Every structure is written in C-alpha cells, then in structure tokens.
Amino acid sequence: MTILMSLDPMALFRSMPGAFAQGLVWGLMALGVYITYRLLDFADLTVDGSLATGGAVAVMLIRSGMHPWAALIFAFLAGMAAGFITGILHTALGIPGILASILTQISLYSINLNIMGSSNQAVSVDKYPLVVSLRYISDSSSTKIRLFITCVLFCVAVVALLYWYFGTEQGHAIRATGCNRQMARAQGINTDFHTVVALMISNGLVGLCGGLYAQYQGAADVNMGRGAIVIGLAAVIIGEVLFGKLCAGKHLAFAYTMFSVIGGAIIYYIVMNIVLWLKLPSDDLKLFSAIVVAIFLAFPYLKSKYGRKGVSVNG
C-alpha cells in the first residue's frame, strides 16, 4: 500500500510520449518480423543481429559526415544483406531456416564489432541533425510534435510501400510461398528466390529500425538487438489480438493489419512503461517482458479453446 501511495501518476503521464515514440520506431522492426513470421511462415532469428547491424552502419556513417537520412538508406541495405545471407544458407545450402538465422545472427556480432571498432559508438544530437532523438521529447512542445509527425509519416510511408509491393506479382508470389510452398511450386513460382527476397525485405526493415533507434538513443551497441525478436513477435500478436477483428473483411485489410502491428509495438512499450512506473525491480524487466508476451501469445489459443467449450455446453 505504501508503494502504491508513493507512485506519481504525472510521472507515468510524462513518460508516455517516450513510449509512443519508441513504439513507432520499433514498429518498423515488428513489420519485418510480421513478413517472415506471418507472410512467409519462416522462423527468422536474424533480427537480433540485423537490428544492431543497421544501428552500427548508421552511426558510423553519420560520424563520418553522412546526413542521418542518407545513413538510414545504408542501414536498410545492411539489413537486407543480413537477410540475404540467411536466405542463401537456407535455400542454397539446405540449412534449416532457424539454424541458418542463428548462424547469421552469431556472425553479425563479430561483424558489428568490426564495423564500429568497439562494442559501442555514440552519436550526439548536439553535433548531428538526427532524424529522431530522445532529446526531442524533453525539448519544447514544437520539437516534440515534429518528432511524432516524423515518426508517424515514416511509418505511413513504409506501410504504403509494403502495401503496394505485396500487391504486385512478386509480392503475391511471396505470400503464396508462405501460404503453401508445394502449391506455389506447382504454379511455377521459384519459392527459393522469393524466400530470399522476403528475408531481405524483412531484415531491411529491421536494419532501418536499428538505424532509427541508434539515433533515438544516441548510440549504437553490439547488444542493442538482444531480445528484438521477442518484441517483434509481441507486437504482431498484440496487434492481432486487439485489432484483428477490426482489420478482417476491410477493403484495405492488409494495410490495416500492418498498422495494427505498429499499434501492437506502441502498446507493448506502454505496458513496459507502466511496469517501470510501478517501481518493479529493473533486473526483472526481461522477466516481465516475457510474461507479457506469453499472455498475449496464449490468448488466441485459450480464447478458441474455452470459446468452443462454451458453445458446445450451451448448445
């Protein structure tokens, strides 16, 4: 009771803009996870490494004089390269997908160290015109509004591009590959090629997120992607659980689904902020994160299981 009385509701309110901004940034990574996890039906663990790679590339290019916006393009390309390696290991060498992604993730740790020359590198908003920064949230209202407008427009642009791409012939081929690989082959689709392409797009988005997040926190670190796959899956599942029915049957259902994934990332960070506000031990944050993810992962199964029982009893 004493702990509850010591909680400051205004402190929670002041922390919400940061949670919202982080959710928008990590929502891009969640979109990458959605592509492999839902569209391609591929368990890709490259994410933990490719996010750090995107951050490392972006920070080092900014420090060398490149504009932060241009650095994001190379962060995207670096992520695509990571996805390409995973795809080739799986399709050309016959290594199971999850093992191929683990091998790539492990190798990226050393690659990221070589890119940065150390375990971390800082990039200060005082010296560079960063696209996003935690400092913008604590600055004036106009700076804060500009940050949110930038993040929202960035996410809308990415969703629009993905919606267009997955409406093309190649995009449909990727979705067909994930839906039924044997049937796709029977229709003349090169499933190996489209698997590699999907992994490149997915990890490109993850690398892009890494570049943005490194700017947001003012540094890149070799461990900044640790646990990213958990956050990505949490965002996908939370979005599906909370917004699934709203998206189903809509004219732009696929676009709504992608926005729901971003919404899931925002809700995830809001929940994590509440956990911190409750002054629970910071050492247990990963444990609480895992519990939150487990609850949302289990929800669809439990709902369908006990929902069916309810129907049979009443019937």
Image (tube, helix red, strand yellow):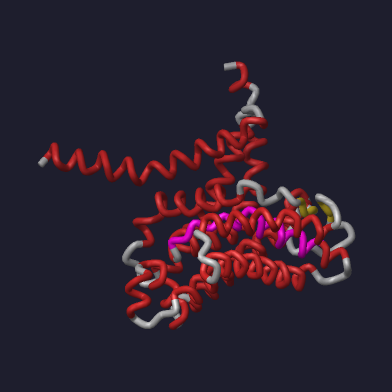
Q: Is residue 232 magenta?
A: no
In this orientation, does residue 199 appear? yes
Taking the image as shown, residue 80 lies to the left or right of residue 56, namely left
Q: Give the percent coordinates (x, y) of residue 308.
A: 21, 43
Q: Is residue 53 magenta?
A: yes
Q: Give the percent coordinates (x, y) of residue 190.
A: 44, 79
Residue at 66% across, 63% down: 207
**Outermost residue toward the front?**
93
Residue at 66% across, 30% down: 283
- Of residues 130 and 288, which is closer to you in this image? 288
Residue at 67% across, 36% down: 11
Residue at 74% across, 56% down: 214
**Outermost residue toward the top?**
2
Main SS class of the magenta portion in the image: helix
Please give the range of residues in magenta. 41-59
Q: Give the percent coordinates (x, y) of residue 280.
A: 62, 28
Taking the image as shown, residue 21 lies to the left or right of residue 168, namely right
Task: Locate the N terminus and report the quarter of the image it occupies.
Answer: top right
Task: Locate the C terminus and report the quarter of the image it occupies.
Answer: top left
Q: Give the percent coordinates (x, y) of residue 4.
A: 59, 22
